[in-house]
Image: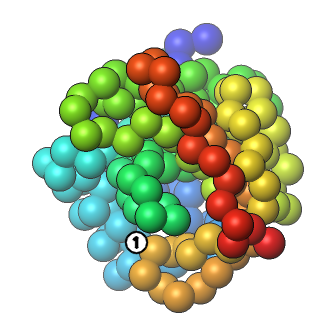
Amino acid sequence: MDVRLAPWSESALDLLRRINTVQMRRHVGGPEPEEQLLARHRRYLAMPATGRGCMFAVLLGDEMVGSIAYHQRDWQGEQIYETGWNVLPPYQGQGIATAAGTALITIVREAARHPDAPHSLHAFPSVGNALSNALCHRLGFTLLGPCNFEYPPGSGSLMCSNDWRIDLANSGRPAVTARRDRL
């Protein structure tokens, strides 16, 4: 299977629209209006220039079949990398998300080698999103437990998510510990 990650581009706007459906966004508040979708697309295009992350289109051969990203953020007083993904329904269940996640983890491990970079990668799937939670387990994340997670960022809207973590540090630093404000 030829699964690759390609940095987000203007041509990925169509993919973003194909992801913006009731089925694909049921765990994250539903589809967004066009103006919010266009703003999201512009943020994705600008991510690499920030030096804090990157959005990728997931390619199967030459076809865009999903998306995956990582970005730096503050989580409970610490800087972490966060990831999230989507695979279009006709391509689910074929190992594409696992291949994309594995490729992304390699990229993030390299990013974590830079001075002052976060040393953990987290994913925050809804507790009700069985497929994404299973993917976290397959990719080697450790489940820290349920938490209240603001999504979309800055909205004030909290969703009940699972906090999954991979320790990226090879320096012998202790792993990040679970916080006490869990559900």
Seen from the viewer's position, the closer of residues 36 and 136 is 136
For image coordinates 40% across by 71% down, the residue present is 37
Outermost residue toward the top in this view: 1
Seen from the viewer's position, the closer of residues 6 and 125 is 125
Seen from the viewer's position, the closer of residues 107 and 114 is 114
- Is residue 92 visible in the rendered image? The answer is no
Outermost residue toward the bottom in this view: 156
- Is residue 49 visible in the rendered image? The answer is yes
For image coordinates 85% across by 62% down, the residue present is 128
Disc 1 crowd, CA 10 A, few/some/many (<14, 14-19, 20+) = some
How many numbered marks appear? 1
Give the labeled residue for mark 1: 37
Q: Quadrant of residue 56?
A: top left
Instruction: Tell me where residue 112 appears, x and y as whole percent.
Output: 35, 30
For image coordinates 30% across by 73% down, the residue present is 39
Outermost residue toward the left in this view: 49
The relative height of residue 133 versus residue 112 in the rendered view (above or below) is below
In the rendered view of the protein, which quadrant contains the N terminus? top right
The relative height of residue 157 versus residue 99 in the rendered view (above or below) is below
The relative height of residue 9 versus residue 31 in the rendered view (above or below) is above
Instruction: Tell me where residue 31 appears, x and y as whole percent.
Output: 59, 75
For image coordinates 48% across by 85% down, the residue present is 155
Callout 1 secondary element: helix
56 horizontally vs 122: left or right: left
Instruction: Tell me where residue 92 appears, x and y as whole percent.
Output: 74, 37
Instruction: Tell me where residue 60 appears, x and y as whole percent.
Output: 53, 24
- Indicate how the structure is coloured in the image: rainbow
| Badge 1 amino acid | Leu
